Image (cartoon, grey):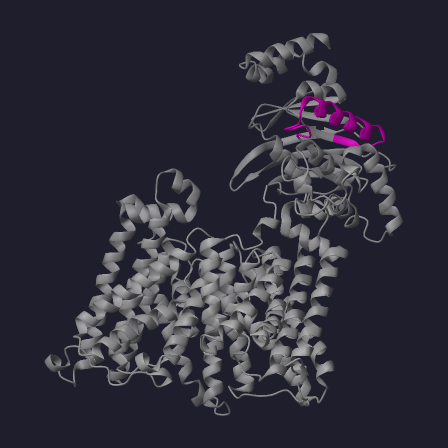
Amino acid sequence: MTAPSRSLRMLDVSAGYGATDIIHTVNLTASAGLITTIAGPNGAGKSTLMKTLAGLLRPRQGSIWIGEQEITALPPPRRAAAGLGYVPQERNVFRNLSVDENLRIGFEFIHRSSGGGEFAAARGRVLDLFPDIAARPKALAGTLSGGQRQMLALGCALIAGPSILLLDEPSAGLSPLYVTSMLDAVAAVNLSGVTVVMIEQNVIEAVRISHEAVLLAGGEIKGRWPANEFLSDPHVRSSFLGGIASKPGLREAVSNDASAA
Amino acid sequence: MMQALLNGLVSGLLIALPAIALSLTYGILNFANFSIGAMITTGAYLAYLVNTTLGAPILVAAPIAAVLLALIAIVIQRGIYRQIRNADHITLLVASMGVAFVLENVIRFFFGADVRTLDVAVARPLSWNGLRLNHEQLLIVTVTLSAMALVAIVLKRTRLGRAMRAISDDPELAEVRGIERARTVDWTWAISGVLTTLAGVLIALDGIVDPLIGTNYLVSVFAAAVIGGIGNPFGAVAGALIIGIVEETSALAVSTTYRQGISFVVLALVLLLRPQGLFGFARIKR
Amino acid sequence: MTGYFVAILTFVSLAVLLGFALNIQWGQAGMINFGLAGFYGVGAYTAAILSKQGVDGVSATVAAIVTTAAISALVSLATIKLREDYLAITTLAFSESVRLVLMNETWLTGGTNGIRDIPRPFVDLVGGERYELFFLAACIVLVAAVYFLLDSVIRSPFGRALRAVREDDVVAATLGKDVLALRVKAFAIGGAVIGLAGALHAFYFTYIDPGEFAGFVTVYAFMSVIVGGKGSNRGLVMGACTVMILLEGTRFLKDFVPFFTAQQAASLRLIMIGTGLILVLIFRPSGLSSEYRLSSPKTADTTS
């Protein structure tokens, strides 16, 4: 995790399933070494955007770049080898394989020619970050709790030493305590120089650790803000938070937090 | 009875090799390979060819045949299964039946329907407390157990094995983790080719070589894989032992000509009562 | 030469019937029947055994249809909740078991010697000379009847429900369709058509043995369906003709390449059939005659 930070860019990318595009001519830059949060209402195309970045979905047009390297045509394994780590929202660990095997798989296909010592060192770094999962190396990943599974998934992406990390809802389904520690872990990873692009439903927690925030709605980028200004921006509040404001409890939480920030 | 049990174990071990192969390709490619019987036959004939025409002893001929069939399997994967667009698992299954048909008839074309035997010496059976174990059976036990141990080591201890299990568990996540699917699929077919060749040679050593030797085992092999929870190679071994023992012990009551019929009944019962396989609970779905 | 064409057309009719059966089982319901040969054998032997016992041809045919349909329903019941792979292997295993019974239960089936001199229905009325032509006419009438019957089934609410189940049985179940009953019925209807074809087979050849009901019959039937375009009964007629032309055309192969033995020529024909099946799957997955798919599900839905 000591490589120089690299940026991730999308230029005029349109992508979707079948004949219909879900994201339209998206231009997005995740600056090197920073955490960028992509926020937006449900159905905005956030997960589609993530899958396009990870290579699981081929863009119909446009290009994708890591630093100065174009990766548009690379399939997911090559993108992973190019330094792109991805944690999907669900199904993000191999459930019938053990914790240790999951970690090893995260490492060995990207560092094909490295010896066992390097893996042990990388494994040690990850387990220092997530002591919770260190206790049960032989347990099948499918038997872990939701929080532990999420940590293992992040650990599997980190163990390869990516320069860019894509996180699809890292706190989904976690208890509030876990949400905070999970995002703290993401912040710690970022401090070591890893560029992070994150989708997060829990926007308040997300902007706490982020540097920049991007609003995605209807498959289009609506704007980009410094993270600490995001929630107080009137445009964001009307087009996005207006959507969740229909849930009374949330509106209160958002406005309280926004004023506190 | 004890003799039948012993024979059943031996024949179960024999069924286990192709059942493992079937489970591996099912787990990774997600389709049932109906050409598994024809692959057994092809492996036996390749060994026969090397054994009798080139005069190589069977211990040399079998590995050569295994490598040849592994290559053929990879060529079939790349030339046929991968070429089928919109390949849902049913289309691939029908294609594999086509492959079986072609393989079987290619063998008929070159070798005719004549019954042949491998060029090996016949030895007296070993006897122990009234139980007889002939040399072929001893060979079956040794070879199958070694092959299974090797497969287990590959699956549990090597990068290839982890790649195979990862793809079987979640193909999309496997790609994200840097696993090249095509390469792993090729290796899976290679292993499948080796295991079916070994089975073919062992069947041939225990009896004869004819164009149907593999097809005659098709139902038993599938029954074994299904009982073990299809896609689970370790379950397939247990399923194969059950099928082997049931087939041999039932021969005490029913004519041996109904061996495949017994497999059908066992298969139908398992599907009705425990469709996920007897060991299906071992896999975590969600 | 006329006799030859009459024979060929009769074969094509039988192949078309088998294809109809696969089209409802596989094309409409998504259920794979790799044991078609076994069900075909059940139909043929039922008709043959009853006719030898003095039962008249029509009753024997009806019995063959009913028996094959009932057995089909039973076999499909075993795997009804599972993926199609399981039905494929179960039907294949069933087919092998049928062959074992045919070969070994000599008291009933004549064993490997088969059953000879099966009485032909209406032979006294028609007379031996014109019988082949009469039989062909009867086959064509039956093919047409089955075609229209199946077409009305496909267009009926039952047919739509069947396709809904094929696409997604969970969704269909939540819509209140009884998935199990639907699939068993579809498989039984297919079985009935196979039973009819089996009976006609027995009466046409007047001699049957277990070797005629081996796996290659299943492959031919699948080939016809795949070439014709899965689910299309009109395309099927063309598919069956193509397969028959391939089979019959290659029969003359050995005249041109004299250094092949008869056995080799036969193998070569089967290799070509198998290769053809694979090539069609790769290059024309929707069949060679997709433009003829007038009775395809979509059209049926919009016109009903």
- Left-right relation of C3 to B35: left
Q: Is residue C215 magenta?
A: no
| Residue C141 can be seen in this image | yes
User: Which picture quadrant has residue A23?
Assistant: top right
Please tell me which residue is depicted at 44% across the width and 59% down the height of the picture.
C87
Q: Is residue A139 above or below residue B70?
A: above
Position of residue A186 measured from the top left corner of the image (x, y, whole percent): 77, 29
Q: Is residue A182 magenta?
A: yes
Please tell me which residue is depicted at 59% across the width and 66% down the height of the picture.
B241
- The quarter of the rendered structure image containing the N terminus of chain B is bottom right
- Left-right relation of B49 to C85: right
Please tell me which residue is depicted at 38% across the width and 45% down the height of the picture.
C164
Position of residue B175 measured from the top left corner of the image (x, y, whole percent): 68, 48
Q: Is residue C221 above or below residue C23?
A: below
Q: Residue furthest bottom?
A: C259
| Residue B65 can be seen in this image | no
Q: Residue furthest left?
A: C125
Q: Is residue C195 above or below residue B202?
A: above
Magenta region, residue range: A169-196
Judge by depth and name the residue closer to the eye, C232 or B248: B248
Position of residue B108 measured from the top left corner of the image (x, y, whole percent): 52, 82
Position of residue C208 measured from the top left corner of the image (x, y, whole percent): 31, 81
User: Which picture quadrant has residue C16?
Assistant: bottom left
Judge by depth and name the residue closer to the eye, A28 or A78: A78
Judge by depth and name the residue closer to the eye, C70 or C14: C70
Q: Is residue A233 above or below residue C45?
A: above
- The quarter of the rendered structure image containing the C terminus of chain B is top right
- Left-right relation of A17 to A215: left
